[in-house]
Image: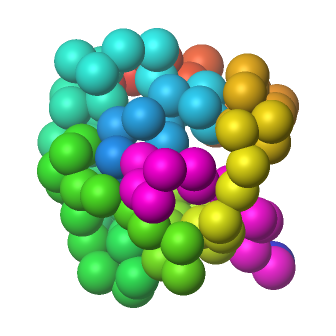
Amino acid sequence: MAARDFPVTGGWITLGQALKRLGYVETGGQAKAWLAASAGQVLVNGQPETRRGRKLRPGDTFTVAGETFHCTEGSPAQEGGNSFPPVNVPGRSPVEGF
C-alpha cells in the first residue's frame, strides 16, 4: 500500500499530535499509553518509536497500525481541522484497548 501524504506546517509535528490528528487517540496521555502498549508497532523512518514527543518533519515517514504516512510541507489550510477520516483498527475503537 502506498504512503499517504501527511501535511506538516511550522517545520515539525510531534508523533503524539500526529496520532491525535489521525484519530488514533484523543489526548496526549492516551498517546503516551497507546505508544507504550504498541511497542514496535509504530515506526518512524523504519525504526520502532515509543516517544510521543518525537518530532516528525517533512521527508519523514511513519507507520501506524500498518498504514504508512509521508510527512510533506503543508500549508495551514491543509492542516486546519482533521482532514483524515477516523482510523478503524479491527477489533477496537481508536481510543480503547490500551
Query: On the rendered structure, is 91 left or right of 51?
Result: right
Q: How many marks?
A: 0
Indicate the position of residue 45 as horizontal and vertical percent values.
40, 82
The residue lying at 21 percent from left, 45 percent from top is 53
**Looking at the image, can residue 17 be seen?**
yes
- Picture coordinates of residue 12, whole percent (x, y): 42, 56
Residue 69's place in the image compared with 8, above or below, is below
Above or below, 40 relative to 54: below
Question: Residue 50 vs residue 86: left or right?
Answer: left
Image point 58% across, 54% down: which residue? 8
| Residue 97 drawn above or below residue 71 | above
The image quadrant of residue 74 is bottom right
Picture residue at 21% right of the left edge, 32% below the top: 32
- Looking at the figure, which quarter contains the C terminus? top left
Check the picture and name the quadrant holding the N terminus.
bottom right
The answer to if 37 sits in the magenta stretch is no
Residue 78: x and y, percent? 80, 42
- Name the image quarter holding residue 41: bottom left
Within the magenta stretch, is there residue 7? Answer: yes
Give the extent of the magenta segment: 2-13
Q: Residue at x 74, y 74 (%)?
A: 3
Which residue is at the front of the view, 74 or 30?
Answer: 74
Give the vertical position of 23 relative to 68 (above or below): above
Q: Is residue 12 left or right of residue 84?
A: left
- Give percent across and percent down for residue 30: 30, 20
